[in-house]
Amino acid sequence: MNRLKRLILSSIVLFSPLTVIAASPFNGCPTEAFLFQGEPANVYAVDLATGNYHIVSTDTGAGGVINAVGFNETDRYIYGWNKAPKTITRINQAYQVEDLTVQSGLPANKSFFVGDIFDNTYYLYLKGSGMFKIDLSQGDDNLVATTIMTASEATLTLTDFAFYPDTGELFAVENTNNDLYLFSFDSSGNANATKIGSTGLSGKTTFGAQYFDKSGFMYISNNHDGKIYRLDLRDLGAIESTAEFFASGPSSNKNDGARCASALVTSSNTDFGDAPDSYKTSLEENGPRHFIGPNLYFGAQIDSESIAAISPSSDDNNGSPDDEDGISFATDFKQGSDVLINITIGGEAVGYVSGWFDWDGDNTFNGDNEQAITDEYLFPGSHTLKVRVPEDAKPGTTWARFRIGKDAGLNYFGGITYGEVEDYPVTIEEQSLTHNYYPGEGTWVTLAYEDNWPAKGDYDFNDVVIFYRVDTISNQAGNIIRYDIHGKLQAYGASFANGFAVQLDNISRSIVDADLAKLVVNDKTLHNTSIIEEGQEFAVALISNNLKNEFTPPECSGNSGKFYRVWRGCTKDAADQFSFVASIPLTSPISTGPDMPLNPFIFSPEGRYHGDNFSMEFPGRALEIHLKGDSVTSLASEQFFSTQEDKSIYSSSNCPGPDCDSFRGENGTPWGLVIDSNWDHPSERIDVLQAYPELAEFANSGGSQNTDWHKRTKAVISKLFQ
């Protein structure tokens, strides 16, 4: 139980309720905001800096909803509308209510949701009923309401409004279009609403709590998700209506807030960043900050600050321990290359980690692609993440920011409870790179496989269909330093499970930087996935152990539930579900590399049935199916060659190489095709020779005749998937 609660309960025990209510206004001007939520009302004290909140009362004595609350700086009480008796109520420091009577002036049988106080006057608003003011100096027994906006004029959908400190301008964000309004008052005191502009917010919004701080910042709290947004209204001569996420508080369908507008928003038990303030670091700039909670931080420790120690200052220079201890960089930052980032999660809790880099050197983190790490869910311990430095990143010293929190969706600014922010200077080095694309930048070849090898099977060549491209990256000297292999799964018509991988023939596994090699699937880097296969002589990039796991089958008729983009007329799965980039950096640059398209192949996963064509029940990694003339890897078996319908005479002395005789059927027909276009594959169980009749002569001639056999104009359209 917190100290404030103990004091409150002690007061209730020692004194009568009437004595407590009458003698306990708030001490001064509280810095926290107060939220009244639920029915009956719970009262929360909210630290606006971080969104940290705690319940200060579960029983106000009201018995129902309290709404339209405002803090009266004159007598230091909170006033609100008690819905059950339909009257205004005064709330003391013990969060107990004392109902008051308004003698006249308010519409009968109405409840108010919108209210605030300025200069000892309580203002109430209700759409379709009007706006009213009550002079609280009249005395508890003589309260009278005055109409200052008629029912016909009260057309805005509001759930709260708030007075500007000192000067008393009244602002509100309405809930229909989320626009900001200013209420002005004429010489007779009558109110008039003027639209200032859009807040830029969208989605489901009900801003049930709105308040100001001493500086002139306005805060609005969304009932539905508890998110608190801030509007910068410090300059009333040039009002900026755009709202920015500020912190997260409690959510509720019944929600209203009050705050002493003359109090600054302050922070306590809070962790800040320390990059220059152009990166949004200080509280005034809505910098990143975390209310320090248990067991969730970077490294070994975290310290508390009341304000951000902005670079060139640092919280390490003020006697605090060095708490920038959770992030280290295992490699240099070079234009166009990946960097290894070591992240240590301390404590005992798991959290979401995000990171930002000022790649363009404009002293902000709001550029395109500057969030390089997004919502990585990391457990306590050490982790290694890989981040690609853009080729156009500005050389020189810049900044990086890392945050961990208990929830996903962190931005590089704004406050949350629990977690930590750490800022680091980093240096980007120049590096001149060139790209050589196969078949071309932005274009694809198609890989198509029949997975029944060494049997022919249904020979429909839609068991695995992949759009495929290779980017060969070279340094300024013209030597190859990396291969980036791009692909998109286009069809999966196999009953069997098949993996997909690419061998870099004659490139020793030992010269591949396995630590920096990475796989990006659907634009998400798989940081904890090792893609350079163990036990291989040459480098093999393992892209999927089982392609069946990479897609959700469509909900179409027939047998389509097993497959992907193979049943004619079943196009509900038209969107790409599995796209990838496999990045394979080399530790030692090489002058020349393998011929294109490298050596892509499918294989049987371990422990999975792959037909009755084998002496063993599960052939596993021993079974690989490559393009005609390509070699198998070190993990494959050569025993399947020259069996069943395979007519190759495979020799490891000739493979890899131009004389390699592999995966050749009768008359030279293959089990794997590479087609220089975005190929339209056959529908399920349609022999490719029926769909593309000229393929037979192409294969029989060794590729010298009917070279355009694969074009749609050469196909039997009725036999293609579409």
Image (cartoon, grey):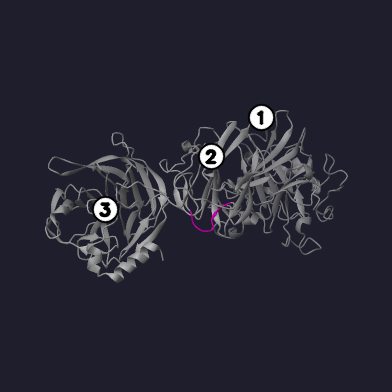
Q: Position of residue 544 (x, y in %)?
A: 67, 52
- 693 in relation to 115, above or below: above
> Is residue 392 visible in the rendered structure shown here?
no
Label ID, residue 432: 1
Residue receiving disc 3: 71
Residue 42 image offset from top left, x and y in percent? 33, 63
Q: Which mark is residue 508?
A: none
Residue type at the position of mark 2: Glu
Q: Quadrant of the N terminus?
A: bottom left
Q: Which residues are magenta?
A: 292-298
Are the residues at dot 2 and dot 3 in contact (C-beta closer than 8 Å)? no
Which residue in the protein does label 2 denote? 370
Indicate whether 90 appears above or below 154.
below
Q: Indicate whether residue 299 is drawn in magenta.
A: no
Name the element at disc 1. Answer: loop
**84 to the left or right of 526:** left
Secondary structure of the residue carrying tag 3 is strand
- Residue 197 in picture, x, y percent from top left: 31, 39
